[in-house]
């Protein structure tokens, strides 16, 4: 139990899953932008291939992060009342839509699409991710979503203090 804080409902062993999963799509989408820039500087095919792989991995892992985020969003009514939670979700969905369009354009039109819409879609996605990450930080650090307070009830077998007191 998190105490008075809004709770994360997608968790294992008391640990929220959403914060565990979000680094994967973030790094993948930022990496796709970096490899797009590298492709633009030398037109080496390896960079374009790397971008496509990074977009694919980013989209697959974003799906997992989105599922756990949506479970958290629906799992505690207090989370839904926080405006930043809705903005965070919408921003992340926008990134997924942009990057889905991005990879479809690339797969249909070849590497030259990177130099057109591709790099702009990647750059816009990274900018939206920065905004969404700021909102995610606000949800944890300002609103305490999924953060257990020191006065919350201990969890048997997981909390050291509880285990020591029971010996």
Image (cartoon, helix red, strand yellow):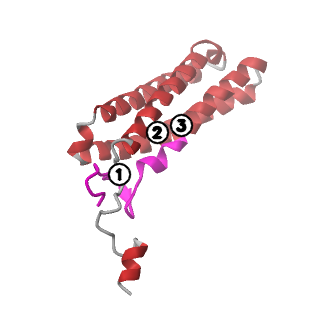
Position of residue 58 in the picture relative to residue 35 (left or right): left
Give the secondary structure at mark 3. helix
Q: Classify mark 1: helix, strand or loop.
A: loop
Residue toward you, 78 or 91: 78
Look at 54% across and 26% down and name the residue there. Answer: 126
Q: Is residue 128 visible?
A: yes
- Label 2 – label 1 distance at C-alpha: 20 Å
Above or below, comparing residue 37 to residue 79 in the picture: above
Farthest residue in the left direction? 77
Q: Which quarter of the figure has residue 49?
A: top right
Which numbered disc covers residue 146?
1
Q: Which residue is mark 3?
A: 26
Which residue is the extreme one toward the top? 116
Within-10-Å neighbours for mark 2: few <14, some 14–19, many 20+ = many
The residues bearing labels 3 and 1 have C-alpha atoms spaced at a distance of 20 Å
Point out residue 42 in the picture as x, y percentages from the top left corner: 78, 20
Report the residue at 28% width, 49% height from top.
Answer: 6
> Is residue 76 left or right of 160 when viewed as pictured?
left
Whether residue 52 is visible? no
Of the residues under marks 2 and 1, which one precedes in the sequence?
2
Question: CB under 8 Å between callouts 2 and 3?
Answer: no
Q: Badge 2 is on which residue? A: 62
Mark 3 packing: few (<14 Cα in 10 Å), some, or many (20+)? many
What's drawn in magenta, residue-wise?
1-24
């Amino acid at each position: 139990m998190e105490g008075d804080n809004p709770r994360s409902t997608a968790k294992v062993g008391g640990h929220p899953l959403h914060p565990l999963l979000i680094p994967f799509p973030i790094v993948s989408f930022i990496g796709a932008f970096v490899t797009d820039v590298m492709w633009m500087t030398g037109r080496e095919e390896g960079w374009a291939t790397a971008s496509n792989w990074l977009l694919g991995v980013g989209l697959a892992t974003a799906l997992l992060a989105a599922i756990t985020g949506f479970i958290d969003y629906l799992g505690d009514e207090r989370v839904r009342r926080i405006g930043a939670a809705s903005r965070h979700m919408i921003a992340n969905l926008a990134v997924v839509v942009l990057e889905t369009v991005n990879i479809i354009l690339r797969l249909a039109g070849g590497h030259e699409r990177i130099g057109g819409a591709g790099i702009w879609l990647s750059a816009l996605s990274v900018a939206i991710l920065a905004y969404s990450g700021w909102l995610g930080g606000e949800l944890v650090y300002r609103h305490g979503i999924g953060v257990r307070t020191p006065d919350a009830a201990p969890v048997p077998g997981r909390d050291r203090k509880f285990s020591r007191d029971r010996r």
